[in-house]
Image (tube, rainbow, N blue to C red):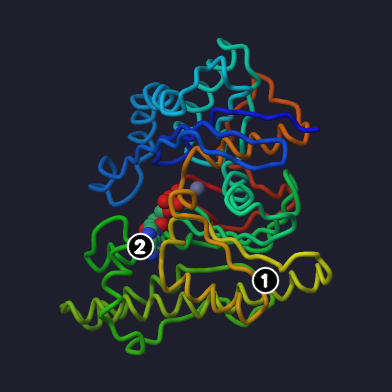
Amino acid sequence: MVPFLRILGIETSCDETAAAVVERDAEGHARILSDVVLSQLDEHSAYGGVVPEIAARAHVEALDELIEEALMRANVSLADVDAIAATSGPGLIGGLLVGLMTGKAIAKAAGKPLYAVNHLEGHALTARLTDGLSFPYLMLLVSGGHTQLILVRGVGDYERWGTTIDDALGEAFDKTAKLLGLPYPGGPAVERMARDGNAGRFDFPRPLVGEARLDFSFSGLKTAVRQAAQEIAPLSDQDVADICASFQRAISRTLKDRIGRGLQRFKREFPSIAETPALVVAGGVAANLELRATLQGLCDKNGFRFIAPPLSLCTDNAVMIAWAGLERMAIGVAPDALDVQPRSRWPLDANAERLIGFGKRGAKA
Ligand code: KG4
Ligand code: ZN
């Protein structure tokens, strides 16, 4: 029988410094004892994107206190946790070094095992913490650094079905916002503007739509937005709103096609799983209501459950890192040695082919 487990999680792979304490009971139920996240948004916003050097420094300055706070809020001491889990990739190497080294130091000093966690695995397993989902299921990760459709077969067992061949989806939102003069991060700003826009005014491209492969491409869309904006400059507020609405519509249509094919493939590969098949969404772009509605509609049509964990667990956090550590402990995976190194690139699916230009921001896989 799997014992009751409690773990401290640490996340520093991008621009959020985070620490959390999470428990797992013998039946696999999770309890989040604390969840502390410090966003570096203010530090980076002047630059219109994440600056790796600034991120690393900010992690160094904040992490110790954040870990103390996570333990305090959980009302536990280091002696009360069974292990430490720290993100060791993929992501910005400076931040990863800060988190992993801190994790190692705590593990050594407190005499606890260390789990070096893949950040993507954290995202991939979150739906098991929130919804007790069984394997296998499909996961769409859409953030500033990733756009991936992943088959989650088991802990440590992933197959990447699709990825972006150029920009990540969040990056496309951020770049579009920037060229329209909207603030960073661009996603929420574009979504806000789109509400008053005419989505039918511009017919933006929907790259790869109709192709059998399940990959994504968003850089052509961004270029089309730039051209449209230049042609009608100077832009009125209504022009910006119309561009944003048309941009979102192109993305919704693209996702409908790509993910629709993914759901069909899942049904072909798993014709007789016991539960209703499920699509899980994660990443900051999952906050977008139009995108959620598109995915919900697609799931309804194809007989899938659509699972969107609460936004705080969809965006970067340490709860998911702690949980990934717990999942590994629960199936008896040995802890990592203290000489484990961070990896800026660390695909979940080691067999997946490396596509040109993927996840440029921080070279995330
Ligand atoms: O997962 P996340 O918080 O951080 C990482 O990328 O690691 O995702 C941030 C991304 C940004 O690109 C942001 O513009 C996008 O998520 N985003 C959105 C929305 N809210 C955040 N994109 C579209 N619509 C939104 N409402
Ligand atoms: Zn992430």
The residue under the point 47% across, 56% down is 143
Badge 2 element: helix
Residue receiving disc 1? 262
* Label ID, residue 187: 2
Residue 322 on image: x %, y %: 57, 35
280 to 291, vertically: above or below: above
Q: Earlier in the sequence, mark 1 or mark 2?
A: 2
Q: How far apart, in angstroms, are the residues tagged by discs 1 and 2?
A: 24 Å
Residue 201 on image: x %, y %: 32, 89
* Label ID, residue 83: none
Count of numbered circles in the view: 2
Q: Nearer the viewer, residue 174 or 16?
A: 16
Amino acid type at image mark 1:
Gly
Q: Quadrant of ligand 1?
A: bottom left
Q: Nearer the viewer, residue 269 or 44?
A: 269
Q: Quadrant of residue 160?
A: bottom right
Disc 1 under 8 Å from ligand 2? The reply is: no
Q: Which quarter of the image is occupied by the N terminus? A: top right
Residue 64 on image: x %, y %: 40, 21
State left or right for residue 44 relative to residue 219: left
Amino acid type at image mark 2:
Gly
Q: Nearer the viewer, residue 102 or 220?
A: 102
Disc 2 under 8 Å from ligand 1? The reply is: yes
State left or right for residue 346 relative to residue 233: right
Residue 12 on image: x %, y %: 46, 35
Q: Nearer the viewer, residue 356 or 191?
A: 191
76 to 143, vertically: above or below: above
202 to 125, vertically: above or below: below
Q: Quadrant of residue 249?
A: bottom left
The residue under the point 72% across, 68% down is 276
The residue under the point 31% across, 56% down is 185
55 to 122, vertically: above or below: above
